[in-house]
Image (cartoon, rainbow, N blue to C red):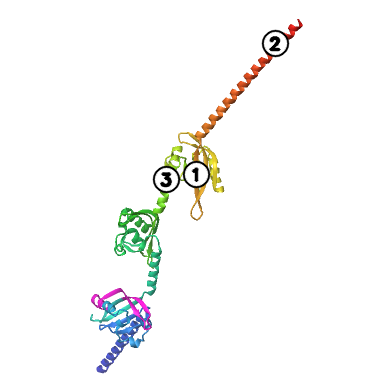
Amino acid sequence: MDKIKDKAIDTLTSTNISTAQKQSSEYARSLIEASLDPLVTISTEGKITDMNEATVNITGIEREKLIGSDFFDYFTEPQKAREVYQEVFAKGSVADSPLTLRHKNGKLTDVLFNGSVYKDDKGNVLGVVIVARDVTAQKLLSRYSLSLIEASLDPLVTISTEGKITDMNEATVNITGIEREKLIGSDFFDYFTEPQKAREVYQEVFAKGSVADSPLTLRHKNGKLTDVLFNGSVYKDDRGNVLGVVIVARDVTAQKLLSRYSLSLIEASLDPLVTISTEGKITDMNEATVNITGIEREKLIGSDFFDYFTEPQKAREVYQEVFAKGFVIDSPLKLRHKNGKLTDVLFNGSVYKDDRGNVLGVVIVARDITAQKQLAEREIAGREKELMRIEELERFRKLTVGRELKMIELKKEIQELRSKN
């Protein structure tokens, strides 16, 4: 009876083990098939022992033919695939090794080869599990991104969280004179005349998420300097983790030269010359404006233009007339120096626009007419004096003529009296 009982227990135990193994096998199979990426198990001899449907689809080979075949035969570079496979055995695993699978119809698929060894319960290596991630879409996206990078005429650089250059376009190579291979992995800040300032702007990108138009100067290896406006923003992975910074450095050398040229034109004017925003605030001026108002340049910038006239409202009306007509000519106004001295000027102005025709503000030239006014006043005074002299001569003439006539009349009367006697 005991023997029958023991046999029944053994049979039941064996059945339970078989059931557990079957369930485990089915679970393993479901995990294999659940993978959207090609998944293959390979023996220590490099032969395929199992695979999922994604592997059948990517190779175009039936499951029965794949089983027992050489795993490396399905790659465009079988030897490279073998070396990566051997690396798995040497290291225990390998991650993201780039390879290319070939479909039987000739279609190629770029994949990232990820693998690890698998063992029995005693730790003996039984083979390798391989997952080949299809990265065709990512590669196309990468090429698209690269084309966007290269399409930029401005230097464009991607930088890691450690401040190392990870990629760049040809414009960056040209502006630095450094080969692409040497730029990759180098410190981004080393190519600026002020590395610390560049680092601070870079850190500002991380702090704010972006930065716009920070002025810096890039140095070419031959010593040539290029003024740039540093624009940057962080870029992230699909989980929102910051991976680094994308920088575009706009070359503003030409604009800076134009600005200097414009400034030289402004300063060349002997008359006060002022640029004013659409809000009526002073944005720039020449030294003549500083002299005629007695106000320092720093205090003039951003101040209300109309405050420096004896009649602010009249000045504002003339300014508004510029916007209405596009220009104004010879409007008389009077500027006040901070010490109280007054200067008569003729207000001439016109609007200035951006390259799209949008009005940015007004350029004003105030012609000092003090000397002309004084000359005119002297001329008027001289004319008045001449008129007075003429009037005096006329009076004298009239007086003289009157006396002559009186004498003639007296002589005539005397003659008449003599003739009667």
Residue 268: percent from left, percent from top: 43, 43
Residue 92 on the magenta span: yes
The residue sitting at the front extreme is 419
Distance of label 1 from label 3 (alpha carbons): 16 Å
Residue 178 relative to residue 335: left or right: left
Dot in front, 3 or 2: 2
Q: Residue at x 72, y 9 (%)?
A: 415
Residue 114 on the magenta span: no
Residue at the disc numbered 3:
264
Residue at the disc numbered 2:
411
Magenta residues span 85-113
Residue 243 vs residue 288, the one in the foreground: 288
Task: Locate the C terminus and report the quarter of the image it occupies.
Answer: top right
Residue 30 vs residue 193, the one in the foreground: 193
Kindly state the secondary structure of the residue where label 3 is placed. helix
Q: Identify residue type, mark 3.
A: Ser
Residue at the disc numbered 1:
364
Distance of label 1 from label 2 (alpha carbons): 76 Å
The residue sitting at the top extreme is 421
Kindly state the secondary structure of the residue where label 1 is placed. strand
Residue 199: percent from left, percent from top: 32, 56
Residue 412: percent from left, percent from top: 72, 11
User: Which badge, 1 or 2, comes first in the chain's sequence?
Assistant: 1
Distance of label 3 from label 2 (alpha carbons): 84 Å
Q: Badge 2: how crowded within 10 Å, few (<14), some, or many (20+)?
A: few
Q: Quadrant of residue 149?
A: bottom left
